[in-house]
Amino acid sequence: MWSCCLRRREAGRVERVSSDETRDGVPLTNLDQPLFDGSGSTKRHLVDYLDAVSERILPVLRERPLSVVRVRPGQPAFMQKNVPKYAPSWVRTVSVWAEASRRQVSYALCDDRRTLLWFANQRAVEYHPALGPAGGDPTHLVLDLDPPEGGAFGLAVKAALLVRQALADAGLAGAVKTSGAKGAHVFVPVETGVPVEDLAAATRALGARAARLDPGLATTAFIREDREGKVFIDSTRAGGATVVAAYSPRVRPGVPVSFPVAWDDLDAVSPGDFTVHTVPALLDGRDPWAELMPPPQRLPAGLVEEGHTIPVARVQAMHEGKRRARARRGE
């Protein structure tokens, strides 16, 4: 759960740069520069894409603490959580205590077109919102399906269908989207008021049930070397975790987009079908993520109880890593 307080950011230093264009009062600069090596796109392509899909992506970003992945010319991509001091005063922020780093982090809230355009001008390519609104409970249970190194998207599709069956067996339903990389994400909307610990437990139980349906294909092993070339069903996306948003571009060759797909069409698509160049025309005024998403559901008590008997993967992996290290040292 997010423990936070909302505030307006104080007006900071404004960099004086020449503007190629202005939209919604936001100066847009250097639009014809390459976006990043291998993108086959310019910064203008990114801006135009995000502007074209703003009415689709803003609903999944609104009121949620936001992390972004930015690319600067000639530099590696990096994730930004703290809003820079030079951000305009109208960029809303939320202060969140980060337990891992023991500090307050000032996240942006991307609530409107103007803020989205400002992020685009900052070369923010990827958009990773929290799973719940600022100060509220998570709204979705998420399973992240990650094929092995060199594995085809088809393996992620097969694992997604295992998850769909596990959901159906529990009386639940979800929506699926490409990750924009090689995997897939399954989102299950849940009723408000579910404690984070129970949501995390239900996620672990669903991941375990899906893996048991075909243990030769899928695994919940958190340690990479234990996965044996199988699809990793990542059930750790709960609490303060983030997942790349539907319709978000990715920092990958060709600038693919994380895109919703109907379950029956999943085995007929490729992640490369959905890019900043193709998605606006594919949408054609629709919002498939909203259309495909089931209504919020109550988590079955048995599912939650089962999940509480399953160790937390990150904690278990940490202890196992220490045990293996001691064994290698002969202790």
Image (tube, rainbow, N blue to C red):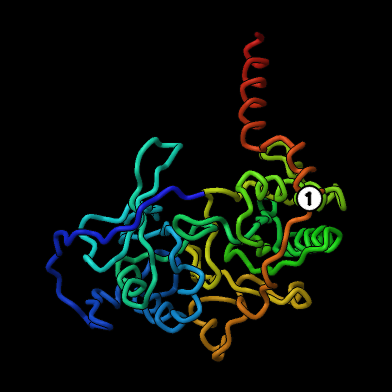
Task: Name the spot of residue 209 as percent of width and height, x first.
Answer: 82, 50
The residue that appears at 23% across and 80% down in the rendered structure is: 25
Which quadrant would residue 97 be assigned to in this image? top left
**Which residue of the protein is positioned furthest toward the left in this rendering?**
16
Q: Nearer the viewer, residue 26 or 291?
A: 291
In the rendered view, would you say 32 is above or below 38? below
**Which residue of the protein is positioned furthest toward the top in this rendering?**
331
Specify whether residue 18 is in view.
Answer: yes
In the rendered view, would you say 55 is above or below 14? below
**Which residue of the protein is positioned furthest toward the front in this rendering?**
193
The residue that appears at 68% across and 15% down in the rendered structure is: 327
The answer to whether residue 73 is left or right of residue 16 is: right
The answer to whether residue 58 is left or right of residue 212 is: left
Task: Name the spot of residue 214 as percent of width and height, x first.
Answer: 87, 52
In the rendered view, would you say 62 is above or below 303? below
Q: Identify the image quadrant of the C terminus.
A: top right
The answer to whether residue 312 is left or right of residue 65 is: right
Query: SS class of the residue under badge 1?
Result: helix
The residue that appears at 54% across and 90% down in the rendered structure is: 285
Q: Nearer the viewer, residue 217 or 83?
A: 83
Task: Name the spot of residue 62 as percent of width and height, x first.
Answer: 44, 69
- Are there few (<14), some (14-19), or many (20+) residues within 10 Å of tag 1? few
Q: What is the count of numbered marks?
A: 1
Q: Which residue is mark 1?
A: 301
Task: Name the spot of residue 73 as percent of width and height, x first.
Answer: 30, 61
Which quadrant would residue 176 be assigned to in this image? bottom right
Which quadrant would residue 135 be assigned to in this image? bottom left
Q: Amino acid at mark 1?
A: Ala
The residue that appears at 23% across and 82% down in the rendered structure is: 22
Specify whether residue 184 is in view.
Answer: no
**Which residue of the protein is positioned furthest toward the bottom in this rendering?**
284
